[in-house]
Image: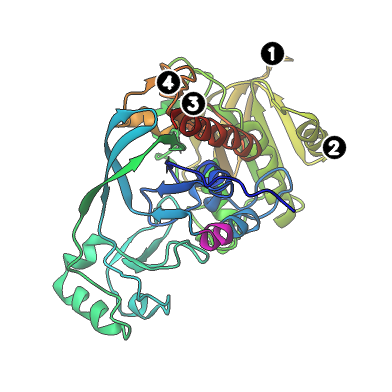
Amino acid sequence: MTEKTAPASGSIMVVGGGISGLTTALEAAEVGYEVFVVEKNPYLGGRVAQLNQYFPKLCPPTCGLEINFRRIKDNPRVKVFTMTEVEKVDGGPGAYTVSVKINPRYVNENCTCCGDCTEACQTEIDSYFDFGMQKIKGAHLPFEMAFPARFIIHPSVKDSPEDAQRVKESCKYDAVDFDMQAKTFDLQVGAIVWATGWEPYDAKKIDNLGFGQYPNIITNMMMERLAAPNGPTKGKILRPSDDKQPQSVAFVQCAGSRDENHLPYCSYICCMASLKQATYVRERYPEAKIYIFYIDLRAPGLRYEKFYKKIKEDENIFFIKGKVAEVSEEPDSGNITVVAENAVTGEKIHQTVEMVVLATGMQPTAAAAKLPADLKYTEDGFIINDFEKGGMFAAGCANKPLDVTSSNQNATGMALKAIQTLVNKE
């Protein structure tokens, strides 16, 4: 006969619904604690949802996210608030009052994801999920397996009375509600885990690498969307200027990372991301030539080292140890010439390719906008965990640059720290 455990007391708030936030929430909820998940986007899944594949198994995001979404759906202790932001945090460990604001989605819970509103809608917006690489309808589902499974209507549709009327009349389930207003309310929690994630560093700030100036220079996250079956090209890697299948691609490592003028730290994931994306190109275009320009290649751990060694065996992948100094475009062809000095031979290299991928670093979301709570940060905007004080903790990439596996491990630890705060305050 098993002994009944005492019911858990107190609630935990997790700010951010990416892979770290989901892990934190589920670990705490599945041992008995009530958890509020607050996510600013209209969906859960964070950056992982935007990937084509992720380590260690190179599986699609559906692989891990689908299981977590099911666990959340089946667990009454987890309450999810999307399109929601934290406005203010008062109190201390064991007794916080958190003011949160829910922004209007203009679609209520009657939504069946039938898609009639998308058919009726004529307003188009840049796809935020695809980094602006395609236009989408103002009434849309963020992506196929979005959780919650509910459409969203962009405010620009409401601003167009005729289109708003079309969209509203198209819904036979009375799910479209343009009377929705932003609303603010308070939640009482004993601990808060900030899993606010990361943003790709703005490559336009790196003047010498041509992003935004030459269309055939893209970022590593844009490459993930190009390679993804649900991306703007349905998984075909095509260069933006003319939809050509590139037969040569250069990857530029440390684009903005390890640079005192941009991000002074190593972003941890970039080297492996480029090696992974080299396999995307290789699978689609077996004869394509791939050039990887790097300062140092970092493959942390035995499994990543094996992957790196496997990539090195490919005779069509060339590694050049040298920091890229400049890029230029051939106006007629749209090809890009990458200029770097080979740090081993001293030779100055001019390599012309059909497309360039910048391995832009990760910047904590909190670097751009500090969070409305009493938190300490590094100079680069990562949240510093104060375990002695307790109560509030940062998980995943809000705390330091991490890959998916490390983020999950870190999030599990932060769930435990949050639980310890509640237990100690009982």
Residue 129 makes an appearance in the image: no
The answer, for residue 69, to whether it is visible in the render is yes
- Under tag 2, what secondary structure? loop
* Residue placed under numbered mark 3 in the picture: 256
Q: Which element is circle 3 on?
A: loop
In the rendered image, which residue does mark 2 sit on?
313
- Residue highlighted by disc 4: 380
Q: Amino acid at mark 1?
A: Gly
Give the numbered dot on residue 346: 1
Name the residue: 16% across, 64% down: 159
**Is the stretch drawn in magenta largely helix, strand or loop?**
helix
- Three-letter code, disc 2: Glu
At which x and y percent is residue 213?
A: 40, 39
Please name whichever residue, 158 or 208, is drawn nearer the observer in this view of the structure. Answer: 158
**Mark toward the start of the polypeptide (4 vs 1):** 1
Give the camera-side residue of 110 and 346: 110
Residue bounds of the magenta highlight: 69-75
Distance between mark 2 and mark 4 Cα atoms = 37 Å
Measured Cα–Cα span from mark 1 to mark 2:
24 Å
